[in-house]
Amino acid sequence: MKPFDRFVVVDWSARSAPSPATPSADAIWIANHADGETKTSYWRTRSEAAGHLAELLESALANNERTLAGFDFPFGYPRGFAQTITGEEAALPVWAWLARQIEDTATNSNNRFVVAAEMNARFPGIGPFWGRPKTLDVAGLPDKGSARDNHGLPEKRGVEALVPRAQACWKLYTTGSVGSQMLLGLPYLHALRETFGKSLSVWPFEAPDAPIVLAEIYPSLLSASVDAVLRADTTAIKDEVQVRLLARALGRLPKSDLTRAFAAATEAAEHEEGWILGVGIEEALNRTALPETAAPQLKNDCFALPPGVDWVPVEDALVRLREGLSPVVTTEGVAVTDAEGRYLAATQTARRAHPPKANSAVDGYGFAHASIGDGHIVLPLAAQAAAAGRAVKAVPHGHAIRILTGAALPKGVDTVVLEEDTRIAEGHVVFGGPVKPGANTRAAGEDLVEGATAITKGARLRPPDLAMLTSVGIGEVEVFTKLRVGVLSTGDELIEPTSAPGDHGIYDANRPMLLSLVRRWGHFGTDLGISADRREVVRTVLDAASKANDAILTSGGASAGDEDHVSALLRTEGTVATWRIAMKPGRPLLLGFWNDVPVFGLPGNPVAAFVCALIFARPALSVLAGGPWTEPQGYTLRAAFSKRKKAGRREYLRARVGQDGSVEAFKSEGSGRISGISWADGLVELEDGTRDITPGDPVRYIPFASFGL
Ligand code: AMP
Ligand code: MG
């Protein structure tokens, strides 16, 4: 079927006189969203608004557009009402009945209280309708809800259990008198049905497949987004904002979410009660309601250290970093099959239970437990077998059916005996009891019930997560756009590995290492090359890089002393804080901004650059990318080495787990020894206090895998 082209949202009004000439809250607002644009209009009377709507739908139809039109009042009454009024348990005949009874003039004066009293008279006791102006005394219409008695109807419809703050449709007067809006709205909708005939369907009583579909909506589903707009613009009129945001949200909703919203209505809703379109997809609606905003930015002073702080313990540095950072990415939808390694932008809940139905956990024979005894059991076998995905008739009491793993338990089956424990003889299955009730079966939803959280926002999706999402019916997810990270090496001495071995200079070892780390962490790594230690060169590179990246990692030139280095440039022309971290290896860490893009200046020494990247850059980039602040999982192992350690700083040793499960340290602590980080499969973390390690002592070992390697 063709998707909708146009989305109309109407905020109806039950006023008894025309609304003020100046646009105000107590009036009819209509939003009309098509081609990415949303317009709203203000109407002082119902008859004018209805005329406008009919024209709008007519011209959409003439242009071969499909329109979804939402109205903010219930389309049906609680169960039991329709039968008494029309003799049918259906909502649409009630519409026709009301259309005959309600008189509504061009200036909004109407007879709704009288009609409500007439309807009340058809029910026993007092009610269900209530509420009227004090001055208007209509017999049979109580002015207080509490005065009602014994009318026998439920107060609310089924859907209202899911939107507890929605008002009941019996209330006709004062705040949120939804009841009056219905009485004065349904006759106009009935007229639209007559005008458009087969070109119009009313959901959920009819399938939402006509060129024009009418549906009930509830603007409060968007209250989070509406409140955000109202906070930013205090002159805005709430009703206008509500219809505008809702029309836009419906218009921008992924098709799968809209389908889900249409599928949510219960059977009672489809007959007489009606259902609110959008219940169950509130998160998706709120996500699409607001206009695309530019990616959020960090505060430029978020890395500043308090005055007087000299050496920062690792723990404090991590806390400061964590507090200063927040995501700088936007979101996009991707198929679950393409979502591995991405950071989830919205918590995903199960669209269907897993398993959807009670089923067999084994290959065997199924029967009703109540039909067997404890001893030797012989049951006649049904001709059919139950297999996954195959519909099977009910199994008669006292019979068994062959059933395969994963097959839904047919009616009449609640217990399964394992095939290996049975024997087949002359069309019967024979086995020994007792068998526990429910043996070898799995309950519906025992893995995850419908609506339960499958994966939470911020999680980085791993292969099992893709299985989890798919098993509960999720085929597409909203993820954060990939964080773009530029990687730059700085130093006059650095050369490319393509240079001849005889050349002077140091091969740039940091760049391939850092780029690979960044990519393993799920980001989009960009190679910014090597910059000489000259201000103009570094400035030019940073200018270009800050336009195309969300974060920049540099290595080298981080020392404060040298005037031509990255630190000096950031200090004079950007923002920078130099953190002297009490850790080995690692010299100062630069944290700054260049054109609003965060720059992480790692030490040049490759061992220190590597360790600082794991300890500081990894959690920081994760947060910028929309993920969690990551804390590496460590394990306590016995040391296979000796070490004398000074107090007042944290040390990371290149380490490796030996055959016997104890942890060895690299033979040299020389910070230039790249062979050590390549030899290692993890780090030993020695806390800040003083401590001498002797073989056999427990130490904290963090495998590289814990850092996402
Ligand atoms: P710096 O922080 O610039 O003073 O550099 C500290 C040490 O690390 C110096 O010996 C540099 O030559 C070395 N170094 C800096 N950057 C790199 C790199 N990308 N690859 C290998 N060694 C480097
Ligand atoms: Mg250097």
Image (cartoon, rainbow, N blue to C red):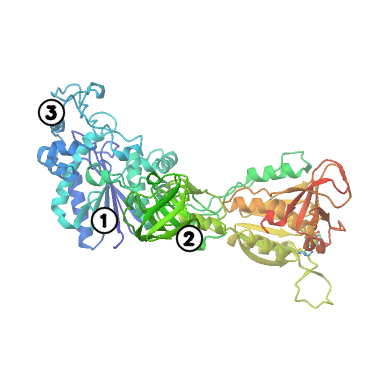
Q: Is residue 470 above or below residue 148?
A: below
Q: Are marks 3 and 2 in contact (CB under 8 Å)?
A: no
Q: Earlier in the sequence, mark 1 or mark 2?
A: 1
Give the residue at mark 3: 121
Q: Earlier in the sequence, mark 3 or mark 1?
A: 1
Q: Quadrant of ligand 1?
A: bottom right
Left or right relative to 37: residue 462: right
Give the residue at mark 2: 334
Label 1 sits on a secondary structure element that is: strand
Q: What percent of the width, then of the height, locates residue 324?
A: 63, 44
Left or right relative to 586: residue 109: left
Q: Nearer the viewer, mark 3 or mark 1?
A: 3
Disc 2 residue: CB within 8 Å of ligand 1: no
Disc 3 residue: CB within 8 Å of ligand 1: no
Q: Which mark is residue 192?
A: none
**Closer-to-camera residue (196/388):** 388
Q: Nearer the viewer, mark 1 or mark 2?
A: 2
Q: Amino acid at mark 1?
A: Thr
Left or right relative to 136: residue 612: right
Instruction: Name the quadrant of the C terminus.
Output: bottom right
Q: Is residue 406 above or below residue 117?
A: below
Q: What percent of the width, then of the height, locates residue 24?
A: 29, 37
Give the residue at mark 1: 67
Q: Nearer the viewer, mark 3 or mark 2?
A: 3
Q: What percent of the width, then of the height, locates residue 338?
A: 51, 63
